[in-house]
Image (cartoon, rainbow, N blue to C red):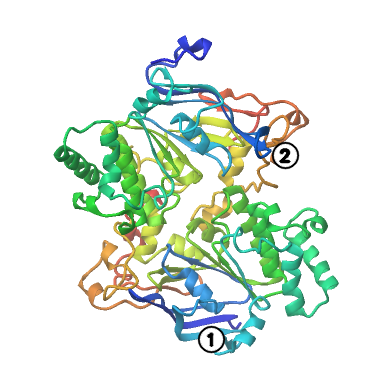
Amino acid sequence: MTTATMPQAAATPTAGDDTLLDVRGLKMYFPVTSGILFQRAVAYIKAVDDVNFTVRRGETLGLVGESGCGKTTTGRCILRLYRPTEGQIWFDGVDIAQARTGQMRTMRRQMQIIFQDPYSSLNPRMTAGNIIGEPLAVHGLVSNKREYRERVGELLSNVGLNPYMADRFPHEFSGGQRQRIGVARALSVDPSFIVCDEPVSALDVSIQAQIINLLEDLQERYNLTYLFIAHDLSVVRHISDRVAVMYLGKMVEIADRNAIYENPQHPYTRALLSAVPIPDPVLDAQRERIILSGEVPSPLNPPSGCVFHPRCPIATDDCTRVLPEAREVLPDHIAACINAPNYGPY
Amino acid sequence: MDPLLEVKNLQTYFFTYEGVVKAVDDVTYEVMPGETLGLVGESGCGKSVSALSLMRLIPDPPGKTIGGEVIFDGENILDVGMDDMRRIRGAKMAMVFQEPMTSLNPVLTLDRQLTETIQLHMGKSRDEARRDAVDLLARVGIPDPERRIRQYPHQFSGGMRQRVMIAMALSCNPRLIIADEPTTALDVTIQAQILELMKSLTQDLGVALIIITHNLGVVARYADRVNVMYAGKIIERGSAYEIYTNPRHPYTVGLLDSVPRLDQRLTDETGNAAKLVPIEGQPPDLVNLPQGCSFRARCRWAVDQCAVEAPTLQPVPSEGDEPHVSACWRTDELGAQALSYAGGGR
C-alpha cells in the first residue's frame, strides 16, 4: 500500500513498534486567491508549518493551542480530510500523506474522528441508529439486517445509551447524549486511532466529565489511541499521557504530561498555563500570572524568526532573526525556543 | 452601606406552546456598590435571563417578569416606564455580552457606536463625545485609538471587540456593569487579558460588576461573592472563599468535583489514575419541574423529604462576616468533607 511519492518512503519509522503515528515535516498551506475567473494564489496561509510528532500505541496525545493555531488542521490532515501540502504521515508503517482516495477509504477503518459540535455534526434527518450504522454498511462489516441492528444496539449500550434509542432523531437527544452518538459512530468500524477534536468544549460542565470518563473507559476497553485536540488545558492534563502545544502553525513544545505542566520549557506554554484560572481563590491568588500582551498574529504574515517573539516576555534580539528549531532541551522534552532550558522551575 | 441593587423574589417566566418555562423562579440577591458578584450555573439555569430581567430586556412575548422587585439605586426598576428605563440602561447600568462578534453593529464605525451613547446620556456635543470615546478606547488598551475609532467592527479581533464593548459599557460612568459570559468566546490568553482589564477598571472606578459564567475558575479569581444557580433558583450563596473551600450544596460540590483542575492530583492513593466524578443525568426540563428539590433526581444524598418540599436557602456556619446560605435539606447533616466524593482530589 505504500505510496512511493517520497524518495525516502522506504525509510519506515524507526522509533520502535510502539509508534502508531509518526508525523514528519507536515505542512498544510491554504491558498488565498484573487481574481474571479482565473483565480491565482496571491498568498498562502500557513495553517500547519513543519510539524513533527509521534503518537504511541494506546496513549493519548493532547494537542493544545489557541484558536487558529492549526491544531484542528493537523488532526484533519492525519485523517486525510485535507491533502497535506508537504510532509509524511506514517500510520502503522504506511505513509498516508499522498495516498489515493481508494486507499484512504480502507485506511479510515483504522482512524476515526469525534467532532466538536454534537449539534451540527449529526445529520438531523437520519436516526441515531443509521448515523451509527452507516459506516458498518459502507465498509461492509455486517452481512444482514439482523446483524446490523444487533451491532448498532451493542454500540449504543457501549456508550451508555439504550438500544431502543436507535430509532430516535438527533433533536430528541441532549447535547451530552448526542456526543455519545458521535462516539458510537466513531467506534462502529473498530478503529485503533481516534482524533477527538474538542469533544467536550460544547458541553456543559457537569456533562463534560461524563464524556471524558466514557472516552477513558473505551480507551481501556478497546486499547484505543487518541489524539485529543482541545483548548482547555485542565481537561488535556486530565486525559493525556503526553501533551503537544501549538502556536501559529508551529509545534512549540512536546513532552510528557507531568513535564509540560510542572516544568514547561517554552514561554508560550508557561503563559498559557498561568492564564488558566483554578477554582480555588486561595491557591489561585498565590500563582504567578503571565498576562501576554497583544494577540496572535495573522498566519498570512507571520513574524520573522520565532513566531512568538512579539508577545514573548523573554524575547531577545536573536529571537527576531533565528527560527527556533524544535529540539530536545531535556530528556524526552522537545521545545522550540532558543533560550530553553535556561530558566528556572515553573 | 446600602446595597446598590436588591433583587427580591424575581420571577421571570416564558409562556410557550409547550408550557410555562420558569426560567427564573423566586431569585433574591443583592449587589453592594463596587463589589464583584459571580453568578454561576450551567446553560439553561436562568443566569442570563436573571440578568436580562434586571435590564428589562426580556422579549415580551413570550417572556414576562411576573413577580418580584428590582431595587436599583433606591427605585424599583420593574415599575418605571420604558422611557425612564431607557435613561437608566446604558447610563447607570450597562451590559457586556458574550458574543463580541454579534453585539456590535457591523455597518457603523466605532465612532458612531461609542459617541451615540455618550451624546444621548451625557448630553455632550459630538466633538466632546468623540474625545471621550478616544480616551475610553485608550483606557481599555486599544493602541492608536485616534485611528482605530474610525474603523468598523470587522477590522477588530475578538479580544479587541470585547475591549470595545467594555469601553462602551463604561462610557457613561455606570454604577453597575453586568457581564454575561464576557470571555467565553475568547482564547485563554485573551480571556486573562479581558478579565484583568475588567477587574482593574471596575476597581478603579468603583463600579459594581456582575459576572455571569459557567466557568468556576473565572469566578474564583475575580468575584468577591458567588451565587450558584440551578434550574431557575439560587441554591447556594457565600463569599468566593466559602463557596470554593466549604461548598455545602450537593450541586455545588458536584460541579467542583466534575471539572478537571490544574492543581488536581492525577492519581489516587493506590496509584491509579484519578477519575472525574460527573453529576449523573441531565438538568431538569424547566417546563415540567419535579415537585420538591429540582436537583433531587441527580443527587446522591436525596431523601424522601426532598421529593415533597423544595428546600429554601438556610444559613450554614461560615468563616468571616459574609453569610453563607444553601438550599438543601441535608446541609447541616452532610459536612463539606462528606459531600466531596472525590475527597483526595481537593
Could you say where residue B107 lies in the image, as x and y percent from the top left?
Answer: 69, 62
Q: Residues within 10 Å of mark 1 (few under 14, many from 20)?
A: many
Could you say where residue A112 lies in the image, as x and y percent from the top left?
Answer: 37, 34
Mark 1 vs mark 2, CA separation in Å: 50 Å
Q: Is residue A24 above or below residue B77?
A: above
Q: Name the subunit of mark 1.
A: B
On residue B78, which mark appears?
1
Along the viewing direction, whichever of A95 and A325 lies nearer the viewer: A95
- The amino acid marked with disc number 2 is Pro
Q: Is residue B218 above or below residue B227?
A: above
Residue B342 seen in render: no
Residue B257 seen in render: yes
Q: Are marks 1 and 2 on the same chain?
A: no
On residue A310, which mark appears?
2
Residue sitting farthest toward the left: A146
Left or right: A113 as drawn, with respect to A341: left
- Residue at figure coordinates x 68%, y 29% from the top left: A339
* Quarter of the view holding residue A318: top right
Left or right: B73 as drawn, with respect to B142: left
Tag in front: 1 or 2: 1
Q: Give the secondary structure at mark 2.
A: helix
Quadrant housing the N terminus of chain B: bottom right
- The amino acid marked with disc number 1 is Leu
Q: Are marks 1 and 2 in contact (CB under 8 Å)?
A: no
